[in-house]
């Protein structure tokens, strides 16, 4: 089965408790798609290449999984 990588951006003013909640929701959504999550890492706050919703920096969750293809196929766009 192919492995995929997903980068999920989180606003820089998001509290740590909310970041933990986002990580859990990402994990559960991947499990709902019958995927296996190899890793889920939170990267430090970094400057974005371009502004997104008036933010110039963001935290990033990087997920490596076999279910991310299903996320792309079904157009997953709802906020987590």
Image: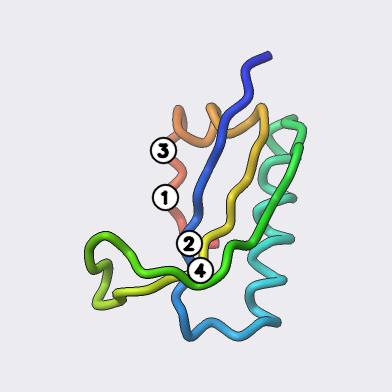
Compared across the picture, whether 23 is left or right of 36 comes to left
Residue denoted by label 3: 75
Is residue 47 positioned above or below 5 on the image?
Answer: below
Q: Residues within 10 Å of mark 3 (few under 14, many from 20)?
A: few
**Which residue position is annotated with label 4?**
59
Q: Nearer the viewer, residue 53 or 49?
A: 49
- Residue annotated with mark 1: 77
How packed mark 2 is, by other alpha carbons closer than 10 Å (few <14, some 14-19, many 20 or more), is: few
Q: Nearer the viewer, residue 42 or 30?
A: 42
Q: Dividing the picture into quarters, in which one does residue 36 lie?
A: top right
Q: Which residue is mark 2?
A: 79
Q: Residue at x 45, y 33 (%)?
A: 72
Q: Nearer the observer, disc 1 or disc 4?
A: 4
Pointers 3 and 1 in contact (C-beta within 8 Å): yes
**Residue drawn where x is 27% and y is 60% of the image:** 49
Mark 4 or 3: the one toward you: 4
Distance between the Cα atoms at labels 1 and 4?
18 Å
Estimate the spatial distance between the alpha carbons at disc 4 and disc 3, rounded to whole Å.
22 Å
């Amino acid at each position: 089965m192919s492995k995929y990588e997903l980068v999920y951006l989180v606003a820089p003013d998001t509290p740590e408790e909310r970041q933990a909640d986002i990580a859990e929701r990402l994990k559960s959504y991947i499990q709902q798609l019958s995927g296996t999550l190899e890793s889920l890492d939170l990267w430090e706050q970094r400057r974005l290449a371009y502004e997104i919703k008036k933010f110039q920096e963001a935290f990033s969750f990087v997920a490596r999984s076999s279910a991310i293809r299903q996320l792309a196929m079904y157009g997953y766009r709802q906020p987590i």
